[in-house]
Amino acid sequence: MNEIIVGIDIGGTTTKYGFVDDSGNVIYQNSIETQVREDFHDYISDLEMAIRDSLAQVNSSLKIKGIGMGAPNGNFYRGTIEHAANLRWKGIIPIVSLVEEHFQVPAIITNDANAAAMGEAIYGNATGMNDFIAITLGTGLGSGIVSNGKLVHGHDGFAAELGHVTVNPHGRQCGCGRKGCLETYVSATGIKRTVYKLLADYMDDSELRSHSFDELSTKMISECALRGDFIAKEAFEYTGSILGRKLADSIAHTNPEAIFLLGGLSQAGDLIFEPTIRHLENHLMPIYQGKVKILPSGLPNQTAPILGASSLIVNHFKK
Amino acid sequence: MNEIIVGIDIGGTTTKYGFVDDSGNVIYQNSIETQVREDFHDYISDLEMAIRDSLAQVNSSLKIKGIGMGAPNGNFYRGTIEHAANLRWKGIIPIVSLVEEHFQVPAIITNDANAAAMGEAIYGNATGMNDFIAITLGTGLGSGIVSNGKLVHGHDGFAAELGHVTVNPHGRQCGCGRKGCLETYVSATGIKRTVYKLLADYMDDSELRSHSFDELSTKMISECALRGDFIAKEAFEYTGSILGRKLADSIAHTNPEAIFLLGGLSQAGDLIFEPTIRHLENHLMPIYQGKVKILPSGLPNQTAPILGASSLIVNHFKK
């Protein structure tokens, strides 16, 4: 083993990076803060220094084969991060050319959910699948669509924004400026909004009445639901009903073999999978019923973003 | 010119077939009735005889390069027609193997809307586009999705059933057994249903009050709208509002360069295009606004189904 792939996951708060060997093991993982530097060039210099230090520490004879990156609004075609709402650097950032300049190896970027989809295809539960969808349920709802064995990037590189299909045009306010987008209902934030709606609608006792919106987390809602809390159970039922209904529309688009539910909210397991599958089947056209698997990730939660990012390079060299 | 492609469009009433030369000209077109024969094998024999007679009539030295077919529920992967609601032959019909046996040339089938999409890509307004969607507005609503330059067939060969995405889960009864599917609102039949709903809701005078549901046609509604009839104009506005809203969801899936509106209802021109585009833009996420073209077919209405079917063979030999 002389070559590794660097996987980088750029989030609003931290930038995780890791080294992945030929067998798909994450042999090292670390992070830096994303937004301390005002100038994006300084951020890239810091990132390079951190990666080179780590590399020297792990094994100075290791060579970097390529650098894969997942980032909000990462554009595969142009190698850019474009107008990312949760990053301080505005406009269009030519991150791929900067990273290639610093490291002199091939670099690829796409958005974090596309990277997650590719991670499942290369290292996870989607190996061998030519047609599937990955849904990441974090602060928002991201997605990656694979058709005919390839990621669907679309004409402008902004395909698979399933967080912004419309559940109800008069519904909840969304960060994108519109109303009723799927992610306002189905995401870590969405289920908190649903809990608050249910606490308003019902008079039932609930442990959740003692927590502020800011305190509330998916984990707390899950634990309450497992203890039988009516509001918490209803919140998962409502979330699954909306996700199931909209996934039926997605299946009518690309007829996937499977849909993967990934990220924070998916950790709730059966609490979210069971109502999602039940409502999905109720809304599917007969030709699709009972045929599309709804599956969890095959990757460990801790290393999934690194593996997703590095899988872009594996896929690049496969061709 | 010694070789032609046979394009066959199998509809519930008639089966159209035609010969397409290397330059994409339909040099001959004819049809037989689809459902006179109880046994599907007899239908194929009749079709072969008709095609061979026509060929002898046009130019007996012509050779058939391949046979492309569009049919309801045509399955590309399996070469079958499966459980087509509007055909008398039930179950799974292995049409490709039968046709290849009769003609000893390569045959391909897919559903009629996928064929229409490929027709636009090879002969029409989508040449050079790698990512687009074709919507056929006939009795129902069919669709074909092209991503990364290839038709999206999905895992089971039933991708792109956009007629059956859900507008309203408590809405109009659909032939698929569910409620509120897009095609119950947006299709030649859908707009008739809308006219009847509007005639019930409003008290305005309208020429359309003197026609039975069975008499009513898209053409009549168009002509009334052009004469300023309120109900007819409202019917197009309503149809466009629903189509625009749902196309926004489709764009969030595959981020196409363009969406083509084809078939009967699209012949209404601006009456359907203008409200569709207006409502679409109102429902799009900012990153997509003003970027996706909504376009008419580049093919003559009369020969489009033949060209669509034959384009499957052109595409097959291109690889």
Image: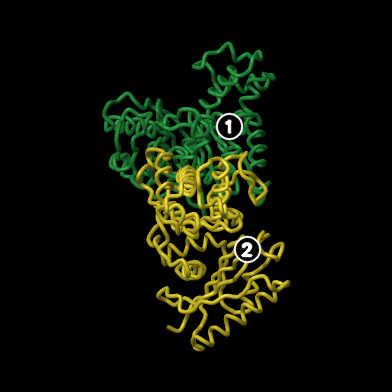
Chain colours: A yellow, B green
Q: Position of residue A268 (x, y in %)?
A: 44, 56
Mark 1 closeness class: few <14, some 14–19, many ≥20 residues within 10 Å? many
Task: Write the residue at 38% across / 51% down.
Answer: A293
Q: Quadrant of residue B30?
A: top left
Q: Position of residue A207 (x, y in %)?
A: 51, 52
Residue B118 seen by the camera: no
Q: Nearer the viewer, residue A309 or A155?
A: A309
Q: Position of residue A115 (x, y in %)?
A: 51, 63
Q: Amino acid at mark 2?
A: Arg
Separation of marks 1 and 2 at Cα, in angstroms: 35 Å
Q: Secondary structure at mark 2?
A: loop
| Residue B87 in the figure: left or right of residue A188 | left
Q: Amino acid at mark 1?
A: Ser
Q: Residue A78, which numbered label?
A: 2
- Kindly identify which residue carries mark 1: B266
Q: Secondary structure at mark 1?
A: helix
Which chain contains the residue that carries disc 1?
B
Question: Do circles 1 and 2 both sit on a common chain?
Answer: no
Q: Position of residue B208 (x, y in %)?
A: 60, 15
